[in-house]
Amino acid sequence: MIALIDYKAGNLTSVRKALAAVGADVFTPEEPRELANARGIIVPGVGHFSATHVLNGAWTDAILDRVGNGRPLLGICLGMQWLYETSEEAPELRGLGLFGGCCYRLAGQQGVKIPHVGWNSLEKQRDESIVDGVPDKAQVYFTHSFAAPITSETVAATTHGETFASIVQRGQVAGVQFHPEKSSDVGLQILRNFLATAA
Amino acid sequence: MLAKRIIACLDVRDGQVVKGVNFEGLRSAGDPAELARRYNVEGIDELVILDITATLERRRAMANTIRSVARELFIPLAVGGGIRTQDDAAAAVEAGADKVSLNTAALSDPELITTLANRYGSQAVIVAIDSKQDGARFPVFSRSGTTSAGRDAVEWAREAEARGAGEILLTSIDRDGTKAGFACELTAAVSRAVSIPVIASGGAGGLHDFVDVFTRGAADAALAASIFHYAETSVKALKQYLRENGIPVRL
């Protein structure tokens, strides 16, 4: 069973549908202790970083406990940003801190609109399980204003005015800034790759 | 590089896709799920379902249409037409819409933009603006183009953005269904006034119309219906043409 964490940051219908399409058995835990049954955890989410405040405390402890036991974790969009130390969007809050660095607001400029909405390409930086079978320059669907910095853990980078981390992975923890559930075949492949690590 | 999006619009009435000219004279163009499937295979970037019916009974049928389209498509899906309340929006989202498009309701109750943006995120809220050019002005119309809203498209787009809209769907009533080309002047005026993406709609005819609206019109996305429904232009052929003309697209 894959635990899909619902912290009321956006609607999860599309994520559930895409996970079902790649054969995942998904549940939405009501209590952090239910994560004990999870083979893998997905933290989705769109919207403001402040929405992650409900994940502080017991949820964070339960998620870190599962990760410590070797279970895979995938953050999607805001869920990926939450894997970092913090975000400029809500500097008073802490993220999970599994990846170093602070998420920041993309700087708009002439001809570069923020939010970054639409299909953009993945520039692969290195190979990791999350991008198995995903070709370099594959295009995926983004909708966000804040992004994670490029670090040694960045798997793919994307450029919109400036270059940011669009996929990150270390060990069994991965994050994607775009929406795999809305990124057609490439997105479904990435979800399959995550599921393979949760087998 | 961020691709310019090509969006197919399905105007749905009684479970069937229909299309008219200048918002009138509707004719049938087929089954929504079947068309959606074809466009997806051809590489459409996004779909919009516009409910052009209004009664409660038909609204329920609409949820079934959304469900049948959303079941097998993993690209963004927007739903508009007759979304007046939070409950209407919730029904569309629960059926599988990623975005809802507000038109008349946003004009009469602009607070609804903010309420929905707070609930689902700005990325889920499109404000649709229908405009007819009047000299150098771009007046806004509501109720499917029948009623003057007493607003200017540029000023209304700015307000919609400030209230939390994530995108603007800008339709030229003059060009709707005419295949005379997009209203580039209108589109550029709105697109340059806001920082959120602007989807140009109304008038798509030939392949070069899309090049025009992405360059002269400064559009972020272009929406069309007729030219795709009747298979006059395949999405793939359009995108190849755009790429040859230096427009970044997803292929």
Image (cartoon, rainbow, N blue to C red):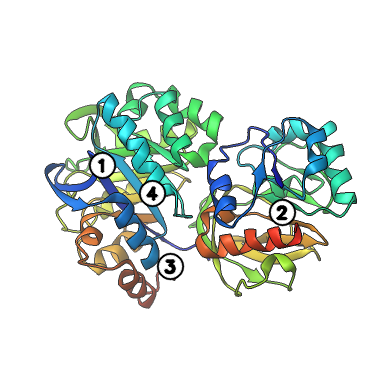
Q: Residue at x 25, y 61 (%)?
A: B228
In front here: A152 or A175? Answer: A175
Q: Secondary structure at mark 2?
A: loop
**Residue B234 visible somewhere in the drawing:** yes
The answer to whether marks 4 and 1 sit on the same chain is yes
Q: Residues within 10 Å of mark 2 (few under 14, many from 20)?
A: many
Give the alpha-carbon distance from disc 4 to disc 3, as whole Å.
24 Å
Residue on which the image places disc 4: B69
**What amino acid does circle 2 point to?**
Ala
Residue A154 located left or right of residue B151: right
Give the alpha-carbon distance from disc 1 to disc 3, as whole Å.
31 Å
Question: Quick one: label 4 or label 1, which is nearer the N terminus?
Answer: 1
The relative height of residue A92 versus residue B187 in the rendered view (above or below) is above
Residue on which the image places disc 1: B15
Residue B93 in percent (x, y) is at 46, 36
**What amino acid does circle 1 point to?**
Gly
Q: Secondary structure at mark 3?
A: loop
* Quarter holding residue A186: bottom right
Give the alpha-carbon distance from disc 2 to disc 3, as whole Å.
25 Å
Give the alpha-carbon distance from disc 2 to disc 4, as whole Å.
33 Å
**Residue A95 visible somewhere in the drawing:** no
Which of the chains bears the disc numbered 3? B
User: Which image quarter is the C terminus of chain A in?
Assistant: bottom right
Q: Residue at x 29, y 50 (%)?
A: B32
Residue on which the image places disc 2: A148
Q: Secondary structure at mark 4?
A: helix
Residue B249's disc is 3
Q: Secondary structure at mark 1?
A: loop
**What amino acid does circle 3 point to?**
Val
Q: Residue at x 67, y 71 (%)?
A: A132
